[in-house]
Image (tube, coloured by chain):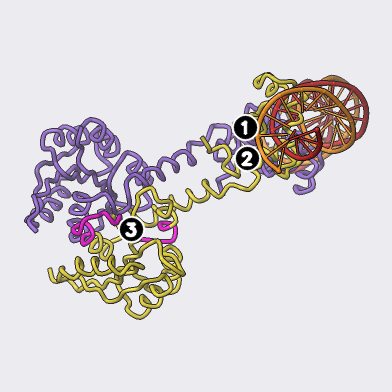
Chain colours: A yellow, B purple, C orange, D red
Amino acid sequence: MTEPTIRVVLADDERMVRTALRAILSAEPDLEVVGEAATGAEAVSVVREAAPDVVLMDVRMPEVDGIRATEQILAGLPEPPRIVVVTTFENDSYVYDALRAGAAGFLLKRADADALVQAVRLVARTDSLLFPSAVRALATEHARVHAAPPAWVSGLTGRESEVLRHMAGGLTNAEIARRMGVGPATVKTHVAAVLAKTGTRDRTQAVIAAYEAGFMNVR
Amino acid sequence: MTEPTIRVVLADDERMVRTALRAILSAEPDLEVVGEAATGAEAVSVVREAAPDVVLMDVRMPEVDGIRATEQILAGLPEPPRIVVVTTFENDSYVYDALRAGAAGFLLKRADADALVQAVRLVARTDSLLFPSAVRALATEHARVHAAPPAWVSGLTGRESEVLRHMAGGLTNAEIARRMGVGPATVKTHVAAVLAKTGTRDRTQAVIAAYEAGFMNVR
DNA sequence: AGGCCGCTCCCCCGTGCGGCGGAGCGGGAT
DNA sequence: ATCCCGCTCCGCCGCACGGGGGAGCGGCCT
């Protein structure tokens, strides 16, 4: 099984990291590091020239971060390389952004040399371990569901949030009053405040806003 | 770099597939097929005895399908193997179920031998290419968002669905009437029908029901 | 020919809701 | 000591809403 050489570009703002990665990958006869970049912008141009098969892309980089660089590379080239995004921590929210941007894989820096090499080989040859398409669909959806909450969310007082939650539970003002142990007039006041702060005109629109804002997904 | 042998179990109801997989994997010195199973139930017991590092699990199998077998294996063993779910088609909805069940990877049957071998090696050594945790979170969320729609959805007439959609857009009856080019009385009739069919008492609850049912995610 | 159903529209009635303005109270900040 | 703010309530008003009726029309099925 004679394989063609896999051409790799490294994008990381730390020279030491690049050196380490180069050392690891160069030890493999079938892998060749054909370029390095220290910024996202640099990565885009280096990739354009070197036409690699795989890019190891750090998320945190000056000028243009790894996510945007990934987007630009995938958008700008007819046959873009497979991009593996590299980061330090697992619970990084960049994960989702990276996948949505079209990254083929996601690698931890604490991964050992062996895993790294095999990940590169794998993404270079196939897209069938965890379809990017499927993962991207999931990530897109995640973004839709967990969209950035509007400003009004933080503007609500404790009581107002409580009332809004009950409104979104389908309760009438009287029911909310009973549940909260206050008078109906008080609830009306809170409702009015919620409508004002959410910029809505009636409880239905307020509930819609709550859902759209992901207000109901919290906690 | 002397590696310990990677122990693999094959679970597929077609003998030919198992044979083919065995042939491919056995050609690699660092891989060893230590068991085969033709059903999901068999897979669970074989895995329990053979204690493999990796399981290649077909989704469609008699008795217990690959998804449930995956769940049972992961739930029942203190140090479960990494499970790669194998299927034929990409747009298979099993993808999400498999990931939610805790599969470490997802492989297409049309993947070539090389990709297969490397996928096995990769999942055996690391979990850092596309964290299962991240992917599982996404899959779980996907399931939550795309939950099975209630029966009433199919019971709504075309006009009623239209009205509900407008209700969930925050419109009043009069506005809906204008947008639909009908009289307000007609809208009221449709609204009444929607409330009856959704089992809700006012438009707010109906809108909530629409959101909860994923009615707003369709198209 | 008759029946069912979806769509259209009508009237009446009670009420939950939202807008408006006002008020008292306690706590934290300045 | 003063002010602001969150929470608690009050009355009044107009209206959109929802419930309960009924009715005509066209299409589909039998």
Quadrant that contains the N terminus of chain A: bottom left
CA–CA distance between discs 3 and 1?
39 Å
The residue positioned 38% from the left and 61% from the top of the image is A103
Q: Which amino acid does label 3 sit on?
A: Gly
Asked if B60 appears above or below A167 in the picture, the reply is below
The crowding category of the residue bearing disc 3, from other C-alpha atoms within 10 Å (few below 14, some 14 to 19, many at least 20), is many
Name the secondary structure under disc 3. Answer: strand
| C-beta proximity under 8 Å, tags 1 and 2 | yes
Asked if B190 appears above or below B31 in the picture, the reply is above
First in residue order: circle 3 vs circle 1: 3
Q: Residue B2 carries which label?
A: none
Give x and y (percent) for residue B216: 59, 43
Mark 1, residue position: A165
Q: Residue A210 carries which label?
A: 2
Chain of the residue on which disc 2 is drawn: A
Chain of the residue on which disc 1 is drawn: A
Q: Which mark is residue A105?
A: 3
Asked if B163 appears above or below D20 in the picture, the reply is below
Name the secondary structure under disc 1. Answer: helix
| C-beta proximity under 8 Å, tags 3 and 2 | no
Query: Is there any visible trace of residue B206 in the rendered image?
Result: no
Give x and y (percent) for residue A81: 34, 70
Asked if B186 appears above or below A172 in the picture, the reply is below
Residue A153 left/right relative to B106: right
Magenta stretch: give its range. Answer: A98-118
CA–CA distance between discs 3 and 2?
34 Å
CA–CA distance between discs 1 and 2?
8 Å
**Same chain check for tags 1 and 2:** yes
The residue positioned 17% from the left and 34% from the top of the image is B42
Give x and y (percent) for residue A182: 71, 20
